[in-house]
Each structure stands twice: as C-alpha cells, then as structure tokens.
Image (cartoon, rainbow, N blue to C red):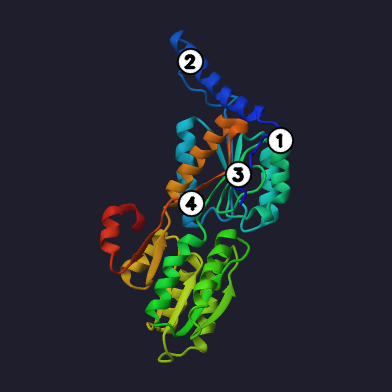
Amino acid sequence: MKSTQKVGAEKPARWRFRASASIAVALSVIVATACGGGSGQSSGSQDELLLGIVSISASESNNARFISGAKEVAKEKGWKVEVVDADGSAEKANTSMRNFVQKDAGAIIDMVFPVTSIGAGLAATRQADIPVATWGGGIDDGVVATTGAGGPLAEPIVKAMAEEMDGKGSVLALTYRSGLVCREREEVFDKIMSDYPNIEVTKNEVGIPGFFQDGAQYATAWLSGNPSGSGNLAIWGCWDDPALGAISGLKQRGREDVEVYGQNGNQEAINAVENGSMTATNYQNSTQEGRKLVETIDQAIEAGDGWKPKNVTVPGTVVNSGNIDQFLKENPKAGG
C-alpha cells in the first residue's frame, strides 16, 4: 500500500476549484435569501458536486448500508449522488467510472472492486483529476482513501471456528476472488487453517449475482460427502449471504450438526444468529464506513496536492449466541 504517495499532485487546482465552487454557491444562496430572492435552495445548480458510486452489488444489504451512510453525508454537504449497480462485473464498473467522468463527477466511490480490476476507470479519473475512494478496493494512483474491510474482519471469526471445532473436522469455505475484500479474507482463512492440519478444507467460489443460490448448491453437494455423525463440520462464508444460502441447504436436508459462520453482520445474518441457525458473524458497521469515506473525500478535495491517501477503519463486532441480546439492545436497527 502506497501510504505516503501524494495524490493529484499534477493538477490539484480542479479539486480546490470544486470546493471553492461549493462555497461560492452557498454564498450566492445567502445573498439571494437576504435580498428576498429565492428559497435558499441550490438544487439543480451546475456547481453542485456529483458523487458517483459504483457498487459491486447495490442490493446486497451490506452494500446498501454503506450507500445509505454515504448518501447521508453527501446530503448534508449538498452533493448529488448517483449509484450504479455493476452486478459483479469489473467491465461494467470501468464503464460506469468512465461515464461518471463524462458527467463531470466531482468524486467517485468504488465499492469492493480491487484497483487492479478498474484500471481503465482509474485512468479516466486520473486524466480528469477526479478523486476516487474505494470501499475495500485498495490504494492506487488517484485513490484518496480506502477502507480496511478485508482481512481484519475475518480473523476473529475464523479463529473462533477453528477453536470451536477442536482443531479437527471438515470446513466448506464459500469464497469470491473477484473482490479484494473476499480475497483478503480468504488469505486470512488460509493462514489460520494452516495451523490446523486436521481440519479438511473444501472451497467453492460463488458468483455475483447468484451468491445465495450458489451457497445453497455447494452446501448441499458438500453435505453428501459429510454425513451426520462424521465429525466436526462447519461452513464459512467470506460474507454473510453465501453462508445464509448454505443455511437454506442445511434446512432442506434437515441437518442441524453443522456450524455456520458469516462476515459483515447484515440484517438476515443477525436474525440467523438470534434464531440459532448461524453460529457467528462479525458485524461491519458499513453505514459508518460510508459516512467516514465521504467525509474523507471532502477532506481530500479541500487539501488538494497536500493530501496523502488514508485507510479508513471502523472496528467490527463479533456477534454470537453469547452476546446477541446485548448487541441488539445496543444496535436495535441491526436486526431489522
């Protein structure tokens, strides 16, 4: 990670202009209001900053929470927001970023696609001096900030799973290598599993879209080779939805002997922990991540060529049967 690299050093003036333009709009509104003209709204102004968001799966609940948080702060700043669902396609993500450049966007957020997959989009944003932030996509030239939503969130869950299996048995890992977050989580999974040679690991990669169905299908096939009474069994998803799909497969087969672990803590996963069908998940406060990333983009625009890329972190919370009641008291909206 290029933690000391300066971003936008070649043409920082545009970023500063956008910030100054927003101030100018605000001042013009104040003057108009003071003179009795206008309602004090700048809606539709050509100077309104457009924040483009390119999501790997906008309908997935954790993505939706992030987008909600980002929109909240953007609204507070008077920014316009447009969201594009790339449906797991890096090609569509690159096209969407180029389209936002054509729309003269003031900033762009890439959600989960690794920077290595959006090279064409980043080339266009660099040429246009548009700052980009990534949600778990990493840092590259032209990226002002990213979030640490990958490996750190997986470590406590995978460790707990291995320990609760007493270091032996079989695990089905549901992965997704097209996203940097899941790749980083899989690396953590592999590292921890290497310390437990008596745990047999089976991996299947799910798709986007189709992750829920894939999780159910892979779980059903895996169960055929791991009948009830064959030892300690567990399923791990690199995020919640494939694991939730696996739970549906378990229910169809009437299997209650398999522990299930997820990541992110979406509403359905929290409910599954509460009803006992999921063993644990790590709640990722993606709403707060969305808020903080937009705030960081604003700071980068204000700083111009003095800005250095940042890794924005929001700690997760492991949720299991031991703390679910207290967690829901403290986070009543998490369970719906």
Q: In this picture, is 230 found above or below 290?
A: below
Give the residue displayed 52% in from the left and 23% down from the top: 42
The numbered mark, 1 or 2, whose residue comes first in the sequence reads 2
Secondary structure under tag 2 reads loop
Question: Regarding mark 4 in the picture, which secondary structure is present there?
Answer: helix
Label 2, label 4: how many angstroms apart (C-alpha)? Answer: 35 Å
Give me the residue at 29% from left, 58% from top. 328
The image shows residue 140 at horizontal and vertical percentages of: 65, 48
The residue labelled by disc 2 is: 38
Precedes in sequence: disc 3 or disc 4: 3
Residue 238: x percent and y percent? Answer: 51, 67
The type of residue carrying mark 3 is Thr
Q: Amino acid at mark 2?
A: Gly
Q: State whether residue 174 is above or below residue 8.
A: below
Q: Where in the figure is residue 149, as x and y percent of width and height?
A: 50, 56
Q: Residues within 10 Å of mark 2 (few under 14, many from 20)?
A: few
Dot 4 or dot 1: first in sequence order is 4
Quadrant containing the C terminus in the rendered view = bottom left
Badge 3 vs badge 1, beta-carbon distance below 8 Å: no
Image spot of residue 298 (x, y percent): 53, 34
Q: Secondary structure at mark 1?
A: loop
Identify the residue position indicated by label 3 in the image. 4
**Mark nearer the N terminus (2 vs 4):** 2
Do the residues under discs 3 and 4 have CB atoms within 8 angstroms?
A: no
Q: Which mark is residue 128?
A: 1
Label 3 element class: loop
Residue occupied by mark 4: 64
Camera-near label (3 vs 4) is: 3
Callout 4 amino acid: Ala
Tag nearer the camera, 3 or 1: 3
Residue at 28% x, 68% y is: 322
